[in-house]
Structures are given as C-alpha cells and as structure tokens.
Amino acid sequence: MPATAAIFDTIYTYGRPHLRKARMNTPERRIRISSGTTYWYKRVLPVFMAVAMAAALAVLFMAARSGRLPWPLLVGPVLLPLLVVAVMRKVLAGIADEVIDEGAALRVRVGGREERVLLGQIRNVSYSAFTNPKKITLRLVDGHPLGRDVSFIPVRRFFSGLFEDNPIAEDLIERSDEARRGR
C-alpha cells in the first residue's frame, strides 16, 4: 500500500473500518475532506450571534430608557456588532461548503456552484492552525473559475494537537506537487 493510501486510511477514515473497507473496494476515491461544521460556521453561528447581540442591545436600551444607564455608554455596544460582522466576514469569506477528494482532483462546492479542481491546478496549499475555525487554503492557477483562493474547514480529530501539522494538508501538498511534476 503506498504511503498516501496509508495516510488516507488513518486520517480520513479515523479508524472506522467500514469507511476503510468501502474505500478499498471502490476504484474511485470519493471522500469528503471538508468538515461537517462548515454549515454551523456559515449559517447557524451568524444567526445565533445576531440574536444574542440584539437581545443584549434591547436590554441595554431598556436600561438606558429607564435612566439606570447613561446614553453615551451605548456607543460601544452599538458598534460592537458591526465589528463582529466585519471579523466574521473576513474569517469566513470564501469558505467552501463541501470539498470531496476524488483522487486526481477535488470537487469543490461553494454555494450552488460546483467545480472540479485538478491537483495540478493547485499552486500552493496552506494550513491556518491558529485561527478558529482552522482552515486549509488552496491557491489555484490563474483563470480558474473558482478564483485565486479556495478555503475549507478540514475534517479533524476531536483532540488534535495545537502544533500538529494537518495530515489532509500534508497529503494535498504532496499529491499536488506530484501532479504538477507530471508523475
């Protein structure tokens, strides 16, 4: 078994024998490498934060209206949601909804759009370990329909170390280098 297949079996399947068996019995490898928490970060968390901030602002406005809180103290809490929205847009901008590893290519879905990215079209793979959520960014060749960069939240173990390299990123780096060299 090649080294990449061994990495795949230990990382992507997380020791779940039914997934490993399914992968070994299919000629085509189609494994989701993006996390299922992407929906949470892109859809649920912003709504939850908006409701929480609206509730907090309502309580502050009622306190200010009753005279218990001076009106100038409301400037910070009113500006805070704008800052939170700006930070969330920056962090979550361009995150793919789903990335499926097909062996020689990745199938990337962003919104309602789905594109196939050949491994040879990936210039660089970077892993952001010190952000939350942790994400992998693929820098693509010029003129790709998805644009210059595509990011996704990778599947990860529950207790992954802070200073560990991401095995999915390492595997994509090796395979994209091999594809560009024509091996």
Image (cartoon, rainbow, N blue to C red):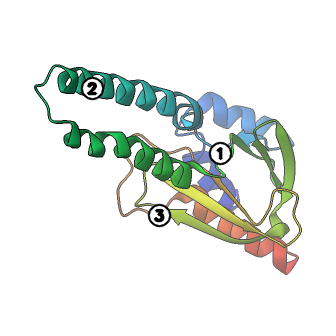
Q: Nearer the viewer, mark 1 or mark 2?
A: 2
Give the mark nearer the N terminus: 3 vs 1: 1
Give the mark nearer the N terminus: 1 vs 2: 1
Give the mark nearer the N terminus: 3 vs 2: 2
Residue drawn at point x = 79 percent, y = 35 percent: 25
Q: Given the image, on which type of amino acid does mark 2 rest?
A: Phe
Q: Pointer 3: residues within 10 angstroms few (<14), some, or many (20+)?
A: few
Q: Given the image, on which type of amino acid does mark 1 rest?
A: Ile
Q: What is the spatial separation of the Cα atoms under label 3 and label 2, in whole angstroms? A: 47 Å
Q: Is residue 177 above or below residue 149?
A: below
Query: Which residue is under mark 2?
Result: 61
Q: Secondary structure at mark 3?
A: loop
Query: Which residue is under mark 3?
Result: 165
Observer-nearest of 64 and 104:
64
Query: Which residue is under mark 1?
Result: 33
Q: Secondary structure at mark 1?
A: loop
Q: Residue furthest left?
A: 68
Quadrant (top left/top right/bottom left/bottom right) for the N terminus: bottom right
Observer-nearest of 74 and 138:
74
Q: Position of residue 18 (x, y in %)?
A: 64, 28
